[in-house]
Image (cartoon, rainbow, N blue to C red):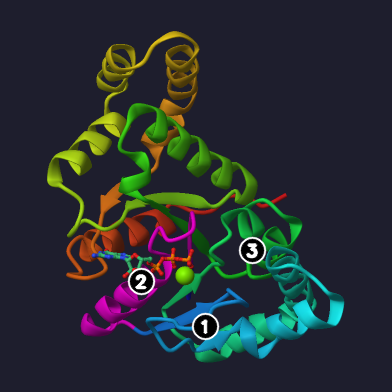
Amino acid sequence: MRIAYLVGTAGSGKSSLTAAYAEWLKQNEQSVATVNLDPAATVLPYEPDVDIREYVDYERMMLMYGLGPNAALVASVREAVREIDALYSEIMDLSVDYVLIDTPGQLELFAFRKEGRAIVKGLKRIPSILIYLMDPVASQTTRLFASSLFLATSVYLSLNLQTIIAISKLDIVPKRILKRIRRWITSQEAVEVDIESRNRGMQMLITRDIVNILHDVGRTFPVITVSSKTLEGVGELHGAVTRVVSEGEYELR
Ligand SMILES: Nc1nc2c(ncn2[C@@H]2O[C@H](COP(=O)(O)OP(=O)(O)OP(=O)(O)O)[C@@H](O)[C@H]2O)c(=O)[nH]1
Ligand SMILES: [Mg+2]
């Protein structure tokens, strides 16, 4: 059994890719289960096999404790963490090859708070990796790209799981933009030239410094472009998942 967490900013395509990747695995005769970790999800593009909403009631959290939407999310995930052993058993009982875990829209809730880390740690007995969804629409200038790379690296530092970057929405984003983002990830020289020609002053210096520091890390992440609508790139993503999983794991401390 292997776990892939799908993590990314709000609307980056986590739930869609969970559905698409699960469909692709089924088409290719692999056993797969999907897990929804978003307590506030109302409609999902897949039928989750394991669902955090069975463990916690997000609406009740809001009403009972007078919480706002984000505080109620934090409280809900905290409550679910108390049930981590039950969650682990439920996943193990599915006895599938691949478990795809769709994480909450609020990236910081899962990636940077102790509740998210506690879930990853609680399920760490199962070899786990991270698929970081990079939204190409939110990465198309050099400055946005630097922010995206920074965020992907931050998630990696926080969760300490082997990471694959999946650039989403391949079918709707112009090919030239996707090509440019891939080039920025693979060639430090290319990204530096573009940063210097497209920015000025402090913005240019900060963007260049961030990319200089993070480029070597970013290059170690496999980068795949995928469409959850057409399934283009999903086979390549699976190839990267099996490769990365066989390379071993990191310890979450
Ligand atoms: N055309 C196209 N649309 C996509 C793709 N992936 C996601 N979308 C659309 O982008 C929007 C957001 O997708 P979701 O899968 O809900 O994104 P998410 O990251 O789960 O969103 P939150 O959980 O709310 O943060 C939806 O309208 C999807 O239909 C894709 O590959 N192609
Ligand atoms: Mg979602």
Q: Looking at the image, is mark 3 or mark 2 nearer the viewer?
A: 2
Question: Which badge, 3 or 1, comes first in the chain's sequence?
Answer: 1
Q: Residue 170, image x and y in percent?
A: 21, 56
Q: Residue at x 72, y 55 (%)?
A: 113
Q: Residue at x 48, y 76 (%)?
A: 1
Q: Looking at the image, is mark 3 or mark 1 nearer the viewer?
A: 1
Dots 2, 1 in contact, CB < 8 A: no
Question: Which badge, 3 or 2, comes first in the chain's sequence?
Answer: 2
Look at mark 2 in the image and give the residue it sits on. Answer: 16
Crowd rating for badge 2 (residues with CA inside 10 Å; few <14, some 14–19, many 20+)? many
Amino acid type indicated by mark 3 = Val
Look at mark 1 in the image and give the residue it sits on. Answer: 42
Which residues make up the magenta segment?
4-30
Q: Residue 241, image x and y in percent?
A: 36, 60
Point out which mark residue 186 bears: none
CB of residue at label 2: within 8 Å of ligand 1?
yes
C-alpha distance separating marks 3 and 2: 21 Å
Q: Residue furthest top?
A: 201
Q: Considering depth in this image, is 253 or 214 the residue closer to the camera?
A: 214
Amino acid type indicated by mark 2 = Ser
Q: Residue 141, image x and y in percent?
A: 32, 32
Crowd rating for badge 1 (residues with CA inside 10 Å; few <14, some 14–19, many 20+)? few
Look at mark 3 in the image and give the residue it sits on. Answer: 120
